[in-house]
Amino acid sequence: MISLTAAAAMALVALGMVLTPGPNMIYLVSRSISQGWRAGMVSLAGTALGFIIFMTMANVGLAAIFVIVPLLYTALKVAGAGYLLWLAFKALRPGGLSVFDARELPRDPGTKLFRMGLVTNLLNPKAAIMYLALIPQFVDQASGGVVAQGFQLGGVQIAVSLTVNAALILASGSIAVFLQRRPSWMRWQRWLTGTLLGAVGIKLAIDAPAPAVSG
């Protein structure tokens, strides 16, 4: 069983990740604006299946690999911290387009919407990094049950991601109009997200254990 601290930290990282514009957010929001919230929800269901696939593959594989190659755990912590800092830099730097810019998209049936949500997530580097480099950071190997902890942490990430994305889907039209009238608010959103990701990235980098040196 994961600790409350690990669950809260995982939720914080997941929140920062889901609020950082990426392939999933761009697809879900643009689809919702062009075809309505129902289309966005069907697409989100495909995205959820993608997360479950990532979670299953990563947890089953990494549990065995960490036992064989302990140094990989440290490498993943450093990689995860570096990726968070890169996302923070991208969020804080000036410029960039808003995911709430209206885009014309063709109307697709439900099966295609679900499939595109799944494919978009499976090809999303943010999702891959989340399960291969970030979630393992919060696994306490000393407590045992690495696989169970991985699934629990993955469940926290999925819950946060689906909740936030569902809210964005339902409010995408109103948010798009609001931000078009108040462009300064988008800058505040980027600064808040960037600061959050940067703080977590720095903490992970500091906490990463130094690799053992033989000789």
Image (cartoon, rainbow, N blue to C red):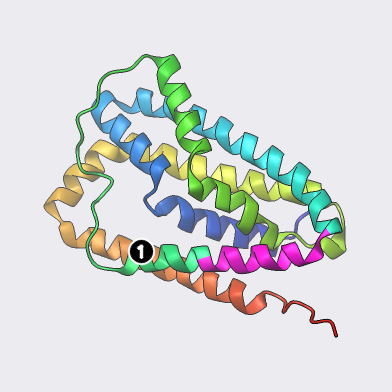
In the depicted structure, whether residue 207 falls above or below residue 34: below
Across and down, in percent, residue 43 comes to 43, 27
In the depicted structure, whether residue 4 falls above or below residue 62: below
Is residue 34 located in the magenta-colored stretch of the structure?
no
Residue 117 in view here: yes
Q: Is residue 181 left or right of residue 211?
A: left
Residue 192 in view here: no
In the image, 75 versus 176, the foreground residue is 75
Label 1: few (<14), some (14–19) or many (≥20) C-alpha neighbours in 10 Å:
some
Q: Report the predominant secondary structure element of the magenta stretch.
A: helix
Question: Residue at point 77% right, 42% down?
Answer: 60
Secondary element type, mark 1? helix
Of all residues, the one furthest to the front in this rendering is 215
Across and down, in percent, residue 147 comes to 80, 47
**Residue underneath mark 1:** 90
User: Magenta part of the protein: which range?
Assistant: 69-82
Q: Is residue 111 left or right of residue 177?
A: right
Across and down, in percent, residue 5 comes to 68, 64
Is residue 74 located in the magenta-colored stretch of the structure?
yes
In the image, 78 versus 29, the foreground residue is 78
Question: Residue at point 49% right, 73% down?
Answer: 199
Across and down, in percent, residue 146 comes to 81, 53
Q: Is residue 178 left or right of residue 164?
A: left
In the image, 35 versus 55, the foreground residue is 55
Question: Residue at point 53% right, 36% down?
Answer: 122
Question: Residue at point 29% right, 25% down?
Answer: 36
| Quadrant that contains the C terminus | bottom right
Residue type marked 1: Lys
In the depicted structure, whether residue 184 falls above or below residue 127: below
